[in-house]
Each structure stands twice: as structure tokens, then as C-alpha cells.
Amino acid sequence: MNKKFRVSDFLLRLAIYISALIAVLILVGIICYVFVRGIGTVNRTFLTTVTSAIKQTVGIAGNLLNTLYIIIITLLIATPIGVGAAIYLNEYAKPGKLVSIIEFTTETLSGIPSIIFGLFGMIFFGNTLKLGYSILTGAFTLTLMVLPLITRNTQEALRTVPDSYRSGALGMGATKWYMIRTILLPSSMSGIVTGIILAIGRIVGESAALLFTAGSGYLLPKFADSLTENIKILGQKALDPGGTLTIELYLQMQKGKYDTAFGIACVLIVIVLVINLLTKIAADKLKPVK
Amino acid sequence: MKNETHASVIGNRKNKAVVETVAQIIFTICATFAILAVASITIYMIVSGTPAIFKVGLKEILFSTQWSPAAKTTEPSFGILWVILTSIIGTTLAILIGVPIGILTAVFLAEVAPKKLAAIVKPAVELLAGIPSVVYGLLGIYLLSPLMYKLELAVFKGSGTHQFTGGANLLSAVIVLAIMILPTVINISETAIKAVPSHIKAASLALGASHIQTIFKTILPAAKSGIVTAVVLGVGRAIGEAMAITLVSGGGVNAPLPFNSVRFLTTAIVSEMGYAQGTHRQVLFTIGLVLFAFIMAINIILNKILKGVKDE
């Protein structure tokens, strides 16, 4: 039996191949181009010093520190709240108005563009709470942004914990809180960790929400000799403006300094790559034992 | 002795009850945090976005095309019609380019491609969804703009009236946006296509339909809701994107024609918020409010779609 040749089939198949080719070429091309163009700029001085006009060197150490700082503060606030919200939604709440409102607002939060978060952060944390342009303002703003990520991933993980675990623990006389602490949280660790890693990815890539909240400093704090002094300096730094890698990239691009910009882009892509790998590993390795 | 243990058990129970209640209260507070956040964002956007409307007039802001907020000699004017239209038209064009390519690529990955190839391409697409938007902007201004400038020179050769943009124009911004929504559209559509039960596909094939007919007449319609979600999320991403297109769109407030230097809702905020004062600053918040209204509308549509899926 001969297969019938259909013109429409042929054309559609052609369209599929062409689209896939375009998409894949563009997307893979982007990764390769940024990497090749930027890798030449990245060296030890670039990563470990700050830009200095006197020494004529370009460096992003200050921005790396700012990025790390914002990640840590944001996660310290967002993780407990996000996980707590997921526990409430999955373990305590009964389906009803409140739950549907919480779910709708969580959904909405993840859909609000970062520039709106930036505006809100600037007027609420910056002006109303008088934090001004500072790393703290930036971290608070980002907390709102990454909250849905952590909540949703924890919720997913809690859902996969079989009900027999819950009834088993409760049946043996454990209280609900004890059951959550010792059974549910360890079993859903993979989801929580995945949420955290995704949140880190979001923070590293964020720029519009930080431009008017965390500002654009690129200097490293002047570290003292004693540890207590250093802690004080770091605490003070949270109230100073500080630009992350993406902000610095934007500013360099605006100035037309493409070498530095591509260097930072290259560093960012490597970070995103590592984060993607970590997410995969977290999802595989920390799977609840069934 | 026996009494003592007894007492301690009772005490323990009381303590436990307190801990239980406290835990529940804390979790509830955590959960209401999202409501609190959305409510305060909404309130703050409205509170800071409306004063300018009263000061300048709603009609003047929304329907005037004249934008000269810092004019010293004449009355400053704050018309953002071009800005709104640019966002709408720019997003629409980006969707028209990005969505077909994205859905067909998803079809390719889920149905047509050999398993090994799909296993290589899929992670690359996922990686791109995580790439910071400024990187797309950097590539846009560095690679795309020069090409666009050449095209512009060719198209407007000998034209005396065209203002040359150096390649930073609506078309460049649209292309950057179209590329940026690709990963979102591909990932979500592919998941939707893969979730179509295999018996639907098998039934169609058994009736004698070719593979391609099956894809377009049964699988895609069955995955409709997921694909629509992908498109809506793509729209949301495109209309809310700021940093990637700030530089490639040019920045002039002009009619949204392909080779004009234009300003989007988002880029209008980014480019002037740093120094704007007084009414000018308030109008920028009004622009933010307009953008927020668009996004909320998209979110509500998306919520309706997702609910519809659940009810099915």
C-alpha cells in the first residue's frame, strides 16, 4: 500500500522543521555568542577586584558581593514565609474563600512584572519605611517576587508525601506540628530546595526591580582587621546602595563598554547554568524515599 | 511519684496545645502574606498613580500624543497615548512572531524530533528561560541594532523626512521580545502537548489520519488550554519586560511604526524615573498604574483559563 502524499502534511512538516531550526539556532546561538565574546574579559582581576580608574583595571568583585548579599537576605526572609504559607495551604486550610484568594494572589504575585515591584519597593520600602536606595530595600522587594516560587514548589512537594505518612504519625500520637516538623518537612525537602534554587536564579537575573531599590554601587566595603568590626561594616553595608551583576551590566551597556558588559553576561550565564544543574540534582537526589 | 508523672503529662499536653495553636497561627500569617503583598502593591500603585490624573486630566494623559514633561518655556504636556499604543502594538507583534515559532518548536520537541535530539535541545531551552533579560538587551543593542540600521538605510534611502534611529527602533524591540518569550512558550506548550493522553493520538492514527494531521487536528486541540496559558504568560512577559528593550527601542516618544524610535510603558518608567520631579514623576507612576491595569487584566484572564481547565 502506498502512503498517500499530502501537500498540506508536507507544508506543515516543513513549517515545524523551519520553526524548530530558527528557535534552536537563535537560542543556542545566544548562549555560544555571549560565552565566546565574554570569556576573554573574565580573569582573576575581573572577578576579584573593583573597577579602578587609577589602576586602569575593570573588576566586578563589589557587584558579586552585592548579588550574594541580596540573595542571602532575600532568602532568609522569603524561605520561612514561603514554606509556612505552603504548609498552611496544604495541611491546615480547608477549601474555601480564603484559600482561593491566597492562591489567586500567589498566582498574581508571580505574574506582576519586575518593574512594578521596583516602583512599589521604591515608594514603600524606600520612601515610606525610609530605607532609601539600599541593599535592604532591594532584598525586601525581591522577597515579594520570589515568594510564589518557594510557596508553589513546597506545595508541590507536600502533595507528593503520601497520606499514610500523616495518618501514621498522627495515629502514633504525634501532634500535628511534630508531624510536620519531623515527617513532612524532611520528605518535601527536594521541593523546598528546588524552590530556593529557582529563587536564586530569579534574583541573579533580576534588574528592573533593583534599579530603583538597591541602586547601583559597585565598590567593596573597606574591611577592617578585627572580625567584630567587619561584621559591623557588613551590617552598615545593608543600608548602602549596591548594584548587582545585572545592574552593572546594564550600566556598562549604557556607557557602550561592551567588553565589560559581555564579561558580566558571560559570568551570569555560567551562574544560570550552574543553577540549572543544581535544580536538576536537587530534584533527583532529594526525592522523598517511597 | 506516680502523681508527679501524671501532672507532668498534663502540663506537657497544655504546652503542646499552645505550641499547636501558635504553629497554626504562624502558618496562617505566612499564607496571608501573599494577600497582604498584592493588596499593598495595588493600593500603592493606585495612590501614587492617581494624583497626576487629577492634576493633568485623564483625557490629557491617556489620549494626548504630546510628551514634553520637562518643557520650561511652554506648558509641559504629559500625553502617553503613543507610549500605550507602542506597548500594545509591540507586544502584539512580538506574540505574532514568537508564538507560532514557539508552538511549532514545542510540537517538534514533543512529537517529531528524535528522542536524543530532544534530550539535548530541551535543557538548552530551559537554560534560556533563566537568562537575565539584560543579556537579551545587550545582544539586541550590540548585534541586532547594527543590522537594523543597515535595513533602515536601505528602506529609507533618499527619504528626506525620516528620522534615522541608528537601528534602535520598534522593530528591534519586537524581535528581542519575540525571542525572549520563546522559552516560556516552548516549555509550557511542550508540557501541554506531552500531557495529552496517548489514546487520543492512537485513536486518530487508527482512523487513518497521518501523523501531521493527528498533531494539528487532535493533539493540539486537546492541548488547547495549556497552549493558551503559554500564550497568555508570553503576553505578560512581553508587556512587562523593561530592561531588555530600554536601549534597543530607541526611547523617543513617537508613533509605533516599525522604524520609529519608540518608548514602551516599561521603558518610559526606567528611562526617566531616575531624575523626574514633581508632576513628571507622578505621571510616571500613572504609567506604572496603566501597566499594572494591563497585567491584572491578563492575570484574571489566566486565572479564568486555569479554572476552566480544573472544571473540565
Image: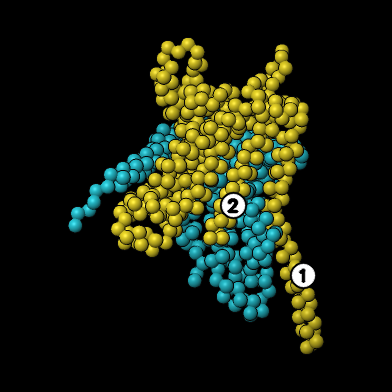
Chain colours: A cyan, B yellow
In the rendered view of the protein, which quadrant contains the N terminus of chain B? Answer: bottom right
Q: Relative to A35, does residue B108 appear above or below in the rendering?
A: below
Observer able to see residue B16: yes
Which residue is tagged 1? B18
Q: Is residue A71 left or right of residue A277?
A: right
Near mark 2 (Cα within 10 A), the count class, few <14, some 14-19 or many ≥20, is: few
Rendered view: A177 above or below B187: below
Q: Position of residue B248 (x, y in %)?
A: 51, 28
Name the residue beneath numbered marker 2.
B304
Per the model, the C-alpha gap separating discs 1 and 2 is: 40 Å
Q: Chain of mark 1?
A: B
Q: Position of residue A127 (x, y in %)?
A: 75, 37
Residue visible at 59% across and 77% down in the picture: A168
For mark 1, does the 10 Å Cα neighbourhood hold few (<14), some (14 to 19), or many (20 or more) residues? few
- With respect to residue B215, does A169 lie above or below? below
Q: Amino acid at mark 2?
A: Lys
* Residue B191, image x, y percentages: 45, 54
Amino acid marked by disc 1: Val
Q: Residue at x 33, y 45 (%)?
A: A12
